[in-house]
Image (cartoon, grey):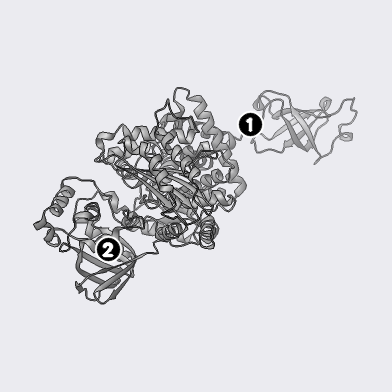
Amino acid sequence: MNKIISSFVDIHQKEYGIESYSRETAFEHFINKCIVNKYSVERFDPTDIMTEPGEKGLDGVAICVNGRLITTCDELQSMCRENPNFEVKFIFIQSKTSESFDGDEIGTFLYGVRAFFADETNRPKTNEKMENLIKLKDEIYSHSVDMSVPPVLELYYVCCGKWMDGNGLMSRVDLDVKPLRDTQDFSQVNFYPYDAEKVITTYKELKKKVSRSFLMEKRITFPDIQGVKQAFLGLVKCQDFITILTDSDNNMLTNIFEDNVRDFQGYNTVNTEIQETLHSDNDQARFGLLNNGITIVAKRITPIGDKIEIYDYQIVNGCQTSYVLFDNREILTDDSYVMVKLIEVTDDVVSDRVIYTTNRQTEVKSEAFIATKLFHKRLQDYYDAVELAYRLYYERRSKQYDLNDSISKNKVVTLTQQIQAYLAMFLNEPHSTHRYYGELLRAYDNKLFLDTDDYEPYFCSAYFSYYVDKQIGLGVLDRKYKKFKYHLICAMRTLIAESAVVFGQARKQQKICKKLWDVIKDEASMKRTLDAAVTCLDSACAQCTNIPSTDQHRSKEITLAMIGFAEIQTKSASNDTFLKKGDIVHCTVTSINPYAVGVSIKTDDARNYGSIYISRIARKYIEDIHDEVSVGQIFQAQIINDDFYEKPWGWELSKVF
């Protein structure tokens, strides 16, 4: 591993808090993040992509549907309800820190891929994580009718050496890949040999430290606008515009659409018409007139004569046009242009406003704009105001913290994670968190992100979620509880502050959060509460034997049973009538009578007094009781009567000899 890549891995380990990983495992984690980031428009946990130790030939497996990484059939079904037309990409990764490409190891990698897609009778059994991904793959293919094209298969073999096109290895790759192509189960099967130079380039693209230059001869400059450093409107050749969209592998640079409010919608009526325009010679020449154009927001714009250079940019409007142009790039002519608006902003409020207004001119679901609303800006301000020891980072815009290497990415909370954590912890709905965030926003629009909500419960719920993730990452908590993460924080809240559903009532929320903060700031209390929550969850799963293990995490019955066990424990902890016959207690002598002594019992129980008859003070005849006891003396005694209230002097006790 060269020094440049080694320094990147060092940064990555600090960002994700994985300093304890071996160098090889950290490199796999790093590569999985770099590569899958090219396909996912949302933040993801690279650990979800990593295969289990011992998996033959594969270090990473990712399944992306409509630009989102999914890991369960639940997520797929939720996405299908939102958008029945979807695009699928299977990404397989093998990462080696060695300095040379090895044909045998590449062959093992491709064998692992073929085994993944083989019939059940012909593939070797593997671990639970891989089996679940295979089930997800099968579920995807059961929806083949909803795909405009078959899935794309992307294969990445990564090595820290240098790939030489004349090394003869590509012939072996073609031979090993041929069976996959022959199945016709994929629209494309692409193999990418990633050497050190490609790793460096990909990491820089991940950090958005990329720029593009293109001709914009026919342009006008906007006058001075508050919050905008400079802005231009002009025509760009469609052929030149493709360079803005293309990554180092000549694929779509998907992360430039992170601030766009909706994904590519496939070839619906509108996008089909755009494509037909490009296939008509006359209409393609008129494309700049017929199309609404593209809006790009960049961190920096530098005009150089007729050229424009843009740095760290986002296409905030025009995703559909961009995808259609990219898909049809081979037929673009020299006389076709697209209208482009370039904006360099100095104020995020202006950027939000541009995103909102440019997209409101077309039909876009309201949840796409949720993060631009004032509540979320103030919620981000609250996160930023939390003392550093407990600081998390609310990511209103997808991947907005990727450029900041000093921020632990494990502490970044996405909009989806925020919804899931709050839904579980304050609305008692952990079994609903597998649903798509837009579906959740619509289902709970009268309970989420209300103007009358306090910001504190949102942060607290995210912090408890972060804490559980951290315990799993450290190996303190078994990874089998990862899919029950939101159940555990629901149980923890019940154990700390009871289970009443509270929303839109800031003062009540603040009282609950005060109790939560008391536990957050006491590491031992957090650990004890998590242990208790795990017990409550285990008890609920054991009680609900009618629910298959695969469905437990989305079962309301499990949630209710778990909350029930947590409430039993909470009531027991607050019970102040727990003394009973047979208990050994500490007593203090408060009074002495000729034949008995009165005592107070050191206890939180309100029934805290009693009496010891002279014959139960010592194993001998007592002539004068004062010879055996004195006021203020402390000793142990055992409760011997059944009911505190049956005698006027309370408990009857016998001194422990």
Q: How many marks?
A: 2
Q: Dot 2 corresponds to which residue?
A: 296
On screen, residue 144 above or below 223: above
- At x 89%, y 27%, the residue is 622
- Which comes before the other along the chain, label 1 or label 2? 2
Looking at the image, residue 248 lies above or below residue 124: below
Q: Residue 197 location, x and y as percent?
A: 45, 60
Secondary structure found at label 1: loop
Residue 276: x percent and y percent? 14, 50
**Disc 1 + disc 2, Cβ < 8 Å:** no
Image coords of residue 169 (percent x, y): 44, 48
Q: Nearer the viewer, residue 529 or 506?
A: 529
**Residue 511 is at least partly visible in this image:** no
- Residue closest to the eye, 3 or 177: 177
Q: Amino acid at mark 2?
A: Ile
**Quadrant assignment, res 296:** bottom left
Regarding residue 479, the answer to whether it shows in the image is yes
Three-letter amino acid code at the position of disc 1: Phe
Cα–Cα gap, marks 1 and 2: 68 Å
Question: What residue does disc 1 label?
Answer: 578
| Residue 153 image offset from top left, x and y in percent | 35, 43
34 on left or right of 334 = right
Work out which residue is located at the far left of the displayed protein and give it.
Answer: 282
